[in-house]
Amino acid sequence: MSENGAGQNQHILLAARPSGAIKATDFEIVDAPMPTPGAGEILIKADFLAVEPAMRGWMEDRASYVPPVRIGEVMRGQGTGTVEASNHPDFPVGTAVTGMLGWRRYIATDGKSVSLRKLPEGVSPAVALNVLGLTGLTAYFGMLDLGKPETGNTVLVSGAAGATGSVAGQLARIAGARVVGIAGGSEKCAWLVDELGFEAAIDYKREDTAQRVADLCPQGVDIYYDNVGGDILDIALDNLALHARVVLCGGISRYNATGPLAGPANYFNLVYKRARMEGFILIDYAPRFAAATKVLVEHLNTGALRHRETILEGFDQLPKALMHLFSGLNIGKQLVDITR
């Protein structure tokens, strides 16, 4: 295997199903033949690849909203790239694109199988994979369709300094809500308040989270956007306002668990508060992606919506980048630049 894969194709395959925390040995980097585009296909050279918490679930052999990645198969993932050869009239050479390219340097595709889209003019790969990517769209539909924030609402967001939580909280702020974020570490909390416009942030690593939620949300939480699950979900359920909405987006606290999973202890507060708790899957909103992207671009252009990326360099850094998500080392979107 070559050191850096420059000028050739490489794949990262799923080598083992993780037990507990993801390990580097769960993946294998292999050299691969350079693909040749057939009729109606294009050759894409990837430049940035994204990692998502959902990948942990894709690595497990269990029923889900998408089939699991098979052992020996290229790891599934979203990326951006440039068309280097084309037999497709809609994607001429030089077109910047984004889609489910997988963890590989080059891919030949008809575009349909990887949900390929052109990057909007002037949009960088980082923005395309962050605010306009899977996590940004997840934040958009979860917060606006399920949460339905209004002026005067109190919104609590866990995992607030991650790619999804940071966008979800800002969309609530733009809608006129008062937003409190929960994140790990003073740097993340300062970013939420000083740059993203959250009213307050709770450092769950150093503060009494239950007490801080009660102090900062004295009238209760109208919308809780959950990216974490576990104890923090219980705290949020204990502080619901009347007719609250709980949006179940992610559960990063449970992804590496190996034993039985406990359910929320305070779930019956949903009854007392006449509240609603609902989960969702992004792919159900696919027909509305273009309309949502247009709104997100408008917010970016006005400066109302800000973003941040944590970027590692090198194709071989992809497993490490994924592990970063579960150790809290990223702020905003975790990306890998594979142009070098």
Image (cartoon, helix red, strand yellow):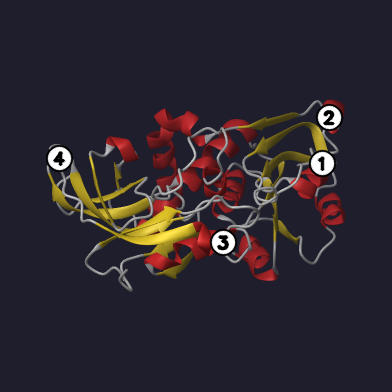
Task: Tell me if mark 1 has few (under 14), some (14-19) or many (20+) residues whose alpha carbon lies within 10 angstroms of its own.
Answer: many
Residue at the (56%, 49%) spot, across then down: 56
User: What's the distance in space between the residues labelled 2 and 4, CA to CA?
Assistant: 55 Å
Q: Residue 268 appears at what percent x and percent y?
A: 85, 30
Element type where label 2 sits in the image = loop
**Label 2 is placed on what type of residue?**
Lys
Element type where label 1 sits in the image = loop
Residue topped by disc 1: 220
User: What's the distance in space between the residues labelled 1 and 3, CA to CA?
Assistant: 40 Å
Closer to us: mark 2 or mark 1? 2
Residue 301's label in the rendered image is none
Q: In the picture provided, is 313 more to the left or to the right than 173?
A: left
**Label 4 is placed on what type of residue?**
His
Q: Looking at the image, do the residues carrying marks 2 and 1 touch, with CB atoms under 8 Å apart?
A: yes
Q: In the picture provided, is 39 more to the left or to the right than 262?
A: left
Specify which label sits upstream in the sequence, 1 or 4. Answer: 4
Q: Name the quadrant containing residue 186.
A: bottom right
Residue at the (70%, 51%) spot, across then down: 253
Residue at the (87%, 28%) spot, across then down: 272
User: What's the distance in space between the residues labelled 2 and 3, CA to CA?
Assistant: 42 Å
Can residue 332 be seen? no
**Label 3 is placed on what type of residue?**
Lys
Residue 88's label in the rendered image is 4
98 in relation to 29, above or below: above
76 in relation to 189, above or below: above
Closer to us: mark 2 or mark 3? 3
Specify which label sits upstream in the sequence, 2 or 1. Answer: 1
